[in-house]
Image (tube, grey):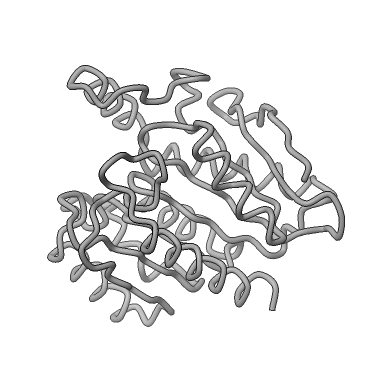
Amino acid sequence: MIEQHLDIPTADGAMNTFVVHPEEGGPFPVVLFYMDAPGKREELHDMARRLAAVGYYVVLPNLYYRNSRDYWLKERTEAGMAEMFGFMATLNARTTGVDTAALLQFVDAQPQANASRIGAVGYCMSGPFVMWAAAQFPGRFSSIASIHGANMATDQPDSPHLMAPRILCESYFACAEIDKWAPPADIQKLESALKTAGTAHRIEWYPGVEHGFVFPLRAGIYNQAAAERHWECLFSLFRRTLTA
């Protein structure tokens, strides 16, 4: 495996990024990995490696680069969570557009990346990000996945569910049964919007698990069986849309 830590220039500054892909057999289809709220950290690097190991050029940026190059949540204390939510509040549809434009320009220039086949996965806070990315760059994405995505239907004009008519690629949504950030009513709005738009999609409920169930280091929340199911579905989606 080839791993790199590098800076990708954006309109808002240098976005420090982890890139990983197999050593032989490229160029490889691209997966853009949008981080969750606790930040870019080794736990996510390991998840990126797992994607890369099955044949993808995986790009995991630090989306908090505008404010910090190395922030990640160390402890789930009240003060720690407040700081995390402060970082999270700096990101929106505009910043997603800026960052995605830079990521696309980067992979377009990489000889080991097949930038004609691009997928994206977003976890928790970045469930909306993959929707915004696919809506703003509809010709570039072959598939997107949102894993226990938060705030998927809001009353704002840029609500993710309102992006459905602009999304041309296939999408997958893994939803935790116990998730205050993505209650059933929100997912119903999302599903209705996707159906009305005629967008190819799949929404899957994961019974008995909580928000964050895929992360191995999330003590008391991680569910191995459900996490492995999410990997199975991700691999199936990307195999079908990026390599078939």
Residue 101 at what x, y percent from top left? 59, 44
Is 165 placed left or right of 159 in the picture?
right
Residue 178 at what x, y percent from top left? 17, 57
Q: Is residue 243 above or below residue 28?
A: below
Q: Quadrant of the N terminus?
A: top right
Q: Quadrant of the C terminus?
A: bottom right
Q: Residue at x 42, y 45 (%)?
A: 216
Q: Is residue 144 above or below residue 73?
A: below
* Marker count (numbered): 0
Residue 147 at what x, y percent from top left? 38, 57
Q: Is residue 39 above or below residue 67?
A: below
Q: Quadrant of residue 162?
A: bottom left
Q: Residue at x 65, y 49 (%)?
A: 58
**Between 139 and 78, the one nearer to me in the picture:** 78
Residue 125 at what x, y percent from top left? 33, 44
**Between 106 and 83, the one nearer to me in the picture:** 83
Is 8 placed left or right of 23 in the picture?
left
Q: Residue at x 18, y 71 (%)?
A: 188
